Amino acid sequence: MHLLRKSQLFFILSFAGLILVGAALLKGSLLLEGKGIHWIDALFMSTSAVCVTGLSTVNVSGFGYGTQGILLLLMELGALGVITLTSVIILLVRHEMNLDNKILVSGIIESYSRREINKLLYVICLYTIAIEVFGAIFLAFGFWIEMKEPFGYAVYMGLFHAVSAFCNAGFSPYDDSLMRTGPLIKLGVAALITFGGLGFYVIYDIGQMLAHGTFMKIHSKIVLITSALVTLGGMAALKFCEFGEGGAISWMDAFFQSVSARTAGFNTIDLAHLHPSSIMILIVLMVIGASPGSTGGGIKTTVFALIAVATWKTFLGDRDIVMFNRRIPMTYVLKAFAITFAYVAVALIGMVLLSIFEDFSYVSMLFESVSALGTVGLSLGVSGHSGIGGKLVLIALMYLGRVGPFTFFIFLLSREKSSRLRYPEERVIMG
């Protein structure tokens, strides 16, 4: 338990420290560029970048290349995690991690043995670099061909959006996000969001399967199937809700927003013009989020899958939760419900706190609260027009959304107890 608390505290403090350093860098960089920014806005933008959210209180288009470069660095560090990068640096310098470092990292990457930590960390960095490089090249051609940007600027925009999309951050130098882009850019960004949201565990598992012929772990199967079903289901639901409303969206935009709402925060349509039912669908997608070990937030696809299967099995009268011919321990099912309950409770508390400081519709404040907590970045305008109180609430939600799921899971893991004492059963009236 001591080691779990140590890794937990180190994780929390590393993000807090990075946010504070990022706020100071953004403030100083803008001063050098002859532009002013309030400390609360610098803190908000740094938190949004480190927590790979994408909510903004100021337009990124107003930043110079230097300040945008700082944003990129904060996104990359926040997505990979300070501990992961530190561990990789140790590996590169010493070519091996000592036992204390392995124990610390394995407290975070709990699904793998300490012997696999080295390989997993290498895979994380190589995979990140490879996807972002290929993504930047692909998007650069997109901005050059579709947006008619000068080649040099197209290369820069390709790099910026590749990092932002893979990190599931959602920042864009365009004030209207990706609303004016064509299908090439939309597909490229959607692919990068997906690759970033699958989780490094899945990528490592697939690599091991292809290289050594091992069987795919049940975690990877759940992630891949759930991600596909949620994305396609969200796309169909958005298309259906907007059908006949006079502003029907295309299948491409419905697909993109379904992918983006899972935790990226880019938008290719004006969210303010969506039907209220579409807004609720986006909220559900934001709550589900990405997958464990990814650059995204939310309750995670595995948690959603466990809750869905457990609910269905309960209706069928089954006592065991079986997936892919494997029985899932009931403790994991209970943790899934606990995580979801805590997540929804915090999102509702965030909405209530926003309503104290701001005067927006409750739907807009719920949307913004879920977006911040899920580190998504989609907005109905609350962030850009909030006062200091509202910004502080959103900063807290973004921070909780980035470090909270890990912290809460480790807390539940450390609180596991085994006892031979069994109390008599008694039924409770349920309805």
Image (cartoon, rainbow, N blue to C red):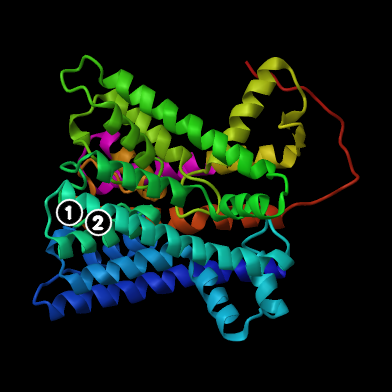
Query: In the image shown, does 73 or 272 lie closer to the viewer?
Result: 73
Q: Position of residue 168 (x, y in %)?
A: 38, 52
Instruction: Give the residue at mark 1.
Output: 144
**Extreme-right residue of the structure:** 420
Judge whether residue 141 can be spotted in this image: yes
Element at label 2? helix
Q: Position of residue 361 (x, y in %)?
A: 23, 34
210 drawn magenta: no
Q: Which mark is residue 265?
A: none
Element at label 1? helix
Judge whether residue 55 can be spotted in this image: no
In the picture, measured across the screen, residue 308 lies left or right of residue 14, that is: right
In the picture, measured across the screen, residue 272 lies left or right of residue 120, that is: left
Query: In the image shown, does 305 or 424 lie closer to the viewer?
Result: 305
Please give the name of the residue rendered at 32% of the width and 18% of the height, measured from the top-left corner: 240
Is the N terminus in the top left, top right, bottom left or bottom right quadrant? bottom right
In the image, the segment drawn in magenta is 342-364
In the picture, measured across the screen, residue 20 lies left or right of residue 65, that is: right
Please give the name of the residue rendered at 18% of the width and 36% of the height, measured from the top-left corner: 270
Q: Against 3, is 379 above or below?
A: above
Quarter of the image for residue 90 reads bottom right
Amino acid type indicated by mark 2: Ala
Amino acid type indicated by mark 1: Trp
Instruction: Give the residue at mark 2.
Output: 140
Q: Are marks 2 and 1 in contact (CB under 8 Å)?
A: yes
Q: Position of residue 127 (x, y in %)?
A: 50, 60
